[in-house]
Image: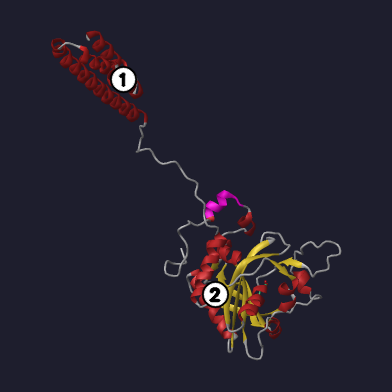
Amino acid sequence: MDDLRQKYLNAIADAADESALEDLRVTAVGKKGEVSLKMRELGRMTPEERQVAGPALNALKDEINSALAAKKSALEDAALDARLRDEWLDVTLPARQRPQGTIHPVSQVTEEVTAILADMGFAVAEGPQIETDWYNFDALNIPGHHPARTEMDTFYMHRDEGDNRPPHVLRTHTSPVQIRSMQENGAPIRIICPGRVYRADYDQTHTPMFHQVEGLAIDRDISMANLKWVLEEFFSAFFGTSVKTRFRASHFPFTEPSAEVDIQCSWEGGTVKVGEGDGWLEVLGSGMVHPKVLAAAGVDPNEWQGFAFGMGIDRMAMLKYGIPDLRAFFDSDLRWLRHYGFAALDQPTLHGGLVR
Ligand code: PHE
């Protein structure tokens, strides 16, 4: 019995892990284990022998069981110590940098413009960037032979030979959305449409893709006076200072009368400042919507009238945020984007402020 005892106590002391320990338990004190088999032999002993062997075997079994339990908890402690050593973490280390994008000035200004005009009751409308020439031109009183078609440097979509459908164009302005909105909703109507427009032109102040916001207000008695008020309110809110406007008589086929609108600015030291000085800067085209345009959109010109305007969003961003070169807007230069971009959570609202 001493041999048995020594054999198992040694083996338990040497066990490397819990599964080795479990094997030992089965071979020693399991149902068919060595100690259990010895216990079965008790029945064949004399009472005297049994009185000695019985308690001794029970004691051996207890001793092995408690050696197993002690070793098991020692192994668990060792495993925990090893984990604590391995899974060490310095919580004082600074976090790894995560690259963070910025909001492009065009997006920012689009949101600002939308917030101001939405507050004046203009809903946001949208239209396709690939337009039929009817929406882009004809419906806006620009017939096929009209010089405005070539003046606008229109991008025409390719047509296969023998495909005689009228051409599609990349819209040259947001004005086609006037037509689509009136067709859809009739009058009265008050909408703006911010979006991309395209013209084949590229220099310091022109890119082939740029952004406009169209405005349209049609009701029974809307006049140029309402247009002037809306624009002056708009510019003052947008630039955060009261801004005078100057209306110059102009011509657009889709408005009559038409006006180009300048805003007050100063030109000191080669930089433009809006809302001060006695200089002027042209920022948009506008006018009273031409009766033919209303009619083309299914609105009765004898009953309804109103104004429309079209303004360059990129130009507004340059003026407000002092950005010198238009082409840089679309170069995707990360340094430029970081410098002129806006924080994602810094979105403009009327209550949060539009001017920084
Ligand atoms: N669509 C004109 C342009 O792109 C601007 C405009 C819009 C003028 C609405 C008058 C009325 O130049």
Query: Residue placed farthest to the bottom in the image?
Result: 302
The type of residue carrying mark 1 is Lys
Type of amino acid under label 2: Ala
Question: What residue is pinned by disc 2?
Answer: 123
Q: How busy is the neighbourhood of tag 2: few (under 14 within 10 Å), some, or many (20 plus)? A: some
Would you say the magenta stretch is mainly helix, strand or loop?
A: helix
In the depicted structure, whether residue 130 falls above or below residue 220? above
- Classify residue 295 by image quadrant: bottom right
The one of 278 and 26 positioned closer to us in this rendering: 26
Q: Which residues are magenta?
A: 332-339
Q: Residue at x 62, y 88 (%)?
A: 304
Q: Is residue 261 magenta?
A: no
* Mark with earlier residue (1, 2): 1
Q: Secondary structure at mark 1?
A: loop
Residue assigned mark 1: 32
Residue at image point 55% right, 60% down: 105
Neighbour class for label 1 at 10 Å: few (<14), some, many (≥20)?
Answer: few
Q: Is residue 203 above or below residue 64?
A: below
Q: Nearer the viewer, residue 26 or 234?
A: 26
For the image, the number of numbered tags is: 2
What percent of the width, then of the height, locates residue 5? 24, 12
Alpha-carbon distance for marks 1 and 2? 86 Å
Colour approach in the figure: secondary structure
